[in-house]
Image (spheres, rainbow, N blue to C red):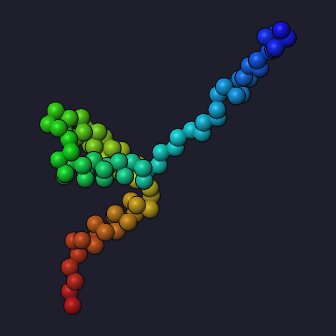
Amino acid sequence: MTDDNKEIPMPTKAEEKPTVEPVNLTIADLQVCKTIIEIASERGTFKADELQMVGLTYNRISQWLTENKLPEEKATEETSSDNQGEEKND
C-alpha cells in the first residue's frame, strides 16, 4: 500500500517555460520577402481578391526599405545615378 502514496514531482517554473530567443529581422530578411512577393505574383500565385492586400504589403515593405537603406547602399545608389547621365567626350 505504500506504493499508492508516492509523490509525483511537479515541474518547476524553469522547466515549464523553455527559453526562447527573440526573433531578429534584418533588412536582408525584408528584401527577401519583397523578392518572394515579386516572384509569386509573376507566377500568378495570388487570387484576384488577395491582390490588394499583397500589393499594399509589397508597397509598405518597399517604402520601408527605401527609407531605411544602409548608408553604404545610399552612397552606391547616388554614385550609380550620377554616372547614368554622363556622356563621354573622347
Residue at the image point whose x is 24% and y is 39% from the top: 54
Is the N terminus in the top left, top right, bottom left or bottom right quadrant? top right
Side (left or right) of 1 relative to 51:
right
Q: Quadrant of residue 75?
A: bottom left
Q: Quadrant of residue 10?
A: top right
Percent position of residue 56, x then y? 25, 37
Can the viewer see residue 3? yes
Considering every residue shown, the one lying at the far front of the view is 1
Residue at the image point whose x is 34% and y is 63% from the top: 77
Percent position of residue 50, x then y? 20, 35
Is the C terminus in the top left, top right, bottom left or bottom right quadrant? bottom left
Considering every residue shown, the one lying at the far right of the view is 2
The one nearer the camera, 1 or 70, is: 1
Can the viewer see residue 63? no
Residue at the image point whose x is 24% and y is 71% from the top: 84
Residue at the image point whose x is 34% and y is 68% from the top: 79
